[in-house]
Amino acid sequence: FLQYSNKKVQWASWCALFVIVLGVLLSESRAGSISIFTVLVIYFIHQNKNKFHYKKHIGSFLLCLSFLLISIFVISVTVYHLKKDSADGRLLIWRCTWEMIKHEPFTGYGVGGFSAHYMDYQAQYFKEHPDSQFAILADNIKSPFNEYLSVGVQFGILTWVLLIAAGIFLILCHRKHPTKAGYVSLLSLLSIAVFSFSSYPFTYPFIWIISALSVSTLIGKAYENTLFQKTTIIKRGIAFFLLIGSLFLLIEVVSRIKAELEWGKVAHMSLCGRTNDMLPRYHNLLHTFRRNPYFLYNYSAELCVAEKYKECLAITAICCNYWSDYNLELVQAEAYIGLKQYDAAKHHLEKATLMCPVRFIPLYRLHYVYMKQGKAEKANRLAQLIIEKPIKKNSTIIQKIKAEMKHHLSRKTCLY
């Protein structure tokens, strides 16, 4: 549209581009900013590649190109310092993720492998580096914030080779039959590829649709004269099977939506204080959501609230197959506290502390466990540690915890 002969269309396109770029910059999206300017650099080079043949234009071309590259660098550095803690937090995530890949470099951990194992590696990192500068930044992580690391963790590093080969193949497809549509498709895929280095765009269906359209455009244009493209029977056969598959998929999706709606109602009623009444309905949903860690965690938490501790631990045992999670460790700890199995509770609270060293709740409940075990000296040391512990984000709960620990040390007792 930027090269459209109609001036009105051109101006409308430039205005739309300006609004999009401005929106990304104002959102302070590092990945978005770098992605946009990378595409602009490639577009600029492509539009001016013929000027390399004219010496008088080379100087101005290189000057403009240098300006764009410097702009990318300045924007990247500026946005990094504006959200430095966030950027440093991702460095921790990438470091722990790389340790995961090193343990299973070729086979990976399978689909969902990151969420099933990552927090264990983060806990191990802080166990080995208790004074790490990243401790204040650590959080309960469910994504590596990098699509390439995500693919490497799940399917092994050989998938990186396949991705590179696929990229080269698509470029060759465009060179074989260059068109404006193919060029735009390449730029779209490039922006997604750059964005994927520090974000997770494929979480959203829109990105899958854009990627599929871009790939089909490039391949379709390159092989539009092949026998396959000309054979109507084959194309109709594929369309028929896709239609049948879509119908079965639609039935499954409708069934899933009904179950999700039921889960939402049950969870809402539980929050309203009707947990015991909702447990049979939770159990009925278990067959549908047996592999859904979010449901399993929700169900186990409600069982813990209802003081059905053994049933709670049975569900958390299933959930642990799909989730390594800070909150899940807390639920297991509370269940063991309810069963008065304090050593097991201590194990899960210590693990939760290693997963997210900045959090106060695991230490607070560990203090309770020490008091129940009669370990007053350990409880006193832990109370002092909680009082001196730096706060990442202040809250009423944290202030109450610190106040209670001060009260404990002043009276050598704690009210529970």
Image (spheres, helix red, strand yellow):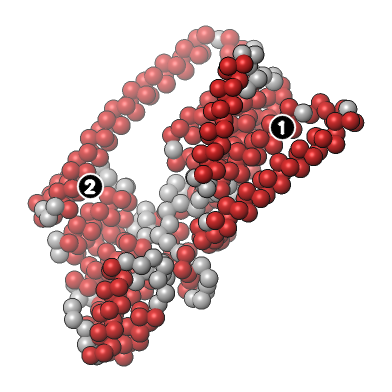
Q: CA distance from mark 2 to mark 1?
A: 55 Å
The relative height of residue 49 versus residue 69 in the rendered view (above or below) is: above
Disc tally is 2
> Dot 2: within a 10 Å radius of its alpha carbon, few (fewer than 14), some, or many (20 or more) residues?
some
Residue furthest toward the left? 277
Q: Position of residue 332 (x, y in %)?
A: 27, 66
Question: SS class of the residue under badge 1?
Answer: helix
Which residue is the site of mark 2?
A: 286
**Under tag 2, what secondary structure?**
loop
Tell whether label 1 touches label 2 (CB within 8 Å): no
Q: Quadrant of the C terminus?
A: bottom left
Query: Where is mark 1, residue-wise?
Result: 44
For the residue marked with disc 1, what is the amino acid?
A: Phe
Residue 261 coordinates in the image, percent (x, y): 22, 38
Q: Residue 118, percent across and down? A: 45, 59
**Front-lying residue, 237 or 350:** 350
Tell me, yes or no, if residue 230 can be seen here.
yes
- At horizontal 35% and vertical 84% (from top left) the residue drawn is 384
Q: Residue 295: image x %, image y %?
A: 27, 49
Please tell me which residue is depicted at 31% across the width and 87% down the height of the picture.
Answer: 380
Horizontal arrangement in the rendering, residue 235 relative to residue 160 (left or right): left
